[in-house]
Image: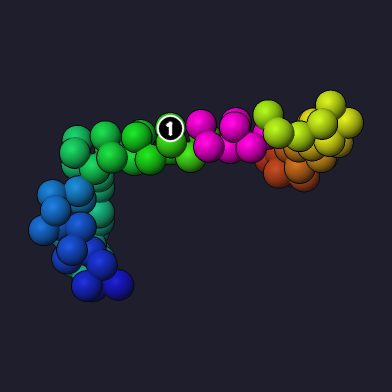
Amino acid sequence: MTRIVHALEEQELVEKRIDENDRRSVRLSATNKGKRLLIRARRRRSEALAQRIDLLSAQEKSALDAALDAVAKLTETQSH
């Protein structure tokens, strides 16, 4: 993990800060450059997925839509 973080720092994609409450811990945050890279990567991934979904039949798209509704219900936060 240290090598990965170091490589991201070298590329100026993240910045590292020592946690003030626990000096043994390090907090990572994306730099503006890192955030822009994430946005571009997510956009490309979304576009690629949309293109693949376009290849599905209407019936397959309906099944996918129903499955996504079921997954959304499973992941909803419930307060107890």
Coordinates of residue 66 in the picture (x, y in percent): 84, 34
Give the quarter of the image for residue 69. top right
Q: Is residue 70 left or right of residue 53?
A: right
The amino acid at mark 1 is Arg
Q: Is residue 47 among what the camera can see?
A: yes
Q: Is residue 78 among what the camera can see?
A: no
Coordinates of residue 20 in the picture (x, y in percent): 18, 56
Query: Label 1: which residue?
Result: 43
Residues in magenta, as a range: 47-53
Question: Magenta residues: mostly which secondary structure?
Answer: helix
What residue is shown at x 88% (from left), y 31% (from top)? 59
Above or below, comparing residue 9 to residue 66 in the picture: below
Above or below, comparing residue 78 to residue 4 in the picture: above
Coordinates of residue 63 in the picture (x, y in percent): 86, 36
Crowding around mark 1 (Cα neighbors within 10 Å: few <14, some 14 to 19, many 20+) is few
Give the quarter of the image for residue 70. top right
What residue is shown at x 13% (from left), y 49% (from top)? 12
